[in-house]
Image (cartoon, helix red, strand yellow):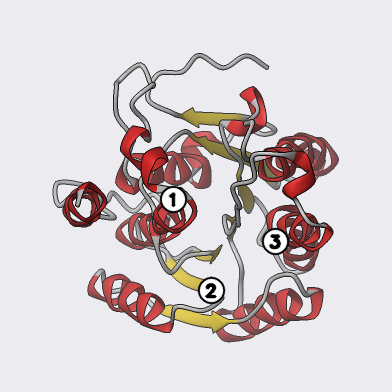
Amino acid sequence: MLFKKMKKSSMVESESIRPSYKGSDKLLDKVAIITGGDSGIGRAIALHFAREGSDVVIVFLRSVKDARETKKMVEKEKRLCLLFQGDIRFEQFCKRVVQETHKHFGKLSILVNNAGVMNQNHKLSDITPGELLRTFQVNIFSFYYFSNAALEVMDKNGCIINTTSITAYRGSEHLIDYAASKGAVVSFTRSLAKNLAKTGIRVNAVSPGPIWTPLIAKTFHKKALEKFGKNTTMGRAGHPYEVAPAYVYLASMDASYITGQVIHVNGGEIVGA
């Protein structure tokens, strides 16, 4: 019963964008690819980008209904939205998304590597080789595939923004492979930022703490959901609309002197390194 109440409540509270959010053309006429953009944090990023003037490309795996709903939301902001359904574990699909995006719009300004998977396992031996491989294929290999393809066509002064996680910094006893893959995202971000600094392309990351998303509802058990986010300084989990503005900032020229950095949106947990 509690789980049903939580889901109903989160549907209301986890709106992707605050009605009071005012766009100011920070991303006017940009073109952004967002993986995992059909729901959760990805959908919130798409709507914030659109309200700031960017056209959006949504990459998703299964939920056609969610993706189409996100597309409608973006179009209500008077921006264009393309949908690509496919498996980002495969390099050829990632390349095709980038190539067709560039062919359609004539440019690519922003890449947001956001899609991710997680599985709860309370013992290391519970993680199967197949699960381990899939976690890394989605959570870090795809970041390489998309970034590599994007760099061939990305605008001068373009940017790449990667989604990592608080688990990369403090670890997680029941999300070992997920935390490890998100740690790899941090190192990838810092290394690629240094590699591309002279080109003018910035590479940064956002590290969400506990955020109510469909991934959490699908992955966590009932007891974990009851306590989700309660141990943060703010005493609650966050919502996608509280994370997305960090991506807007990093994608905009307001962050023109920022690269290789991670913004932590976690309800007050102090993170070192």
Of the two numbered discs 3 and 1 in the rendering, the one whose residue sits closer to the viewer: 1
Q: Label 1, on which residue? A: 216
Which comes before the other along the chain, label 3 or label 2? 2
Q: CA gap, disc 2 to disc 1?
A: 17 Å
Tag 2's secondary structure?
strand
Q: On the rendered structure, is 84 left or right of 185?
A: left
Task: Look at 57% across and 55% down and name the residue there.
Answer: 114
Q: On the rendered structure, is 199 left or right of 115?
A: right
Q: Nearer the viewer, residue 23 or 227?
A: 227
The three-letter code of the residue at mark 2 reads Phe
* Crowd tier of the residue under label 1, counting other residues whose Cα lies within 10 Å: few below 14, some 14–19, many 20 or above: some
Q: Label 2, on which residue? A: 60
Asked where in the image residue 8 lies, by quadrant, the reply is: bottom left
Q: Label 3, on which residue? A: 138
* Crowd tier of the residue under label 3, counting other residues whose Cα lies within 10 Å: few below 14, some 14–19, many 20 or above: many
The three-letter code of the residue at mark 1 reads Ile
Q: CA gap, disc 3 to disc 2?
A: 12 Å
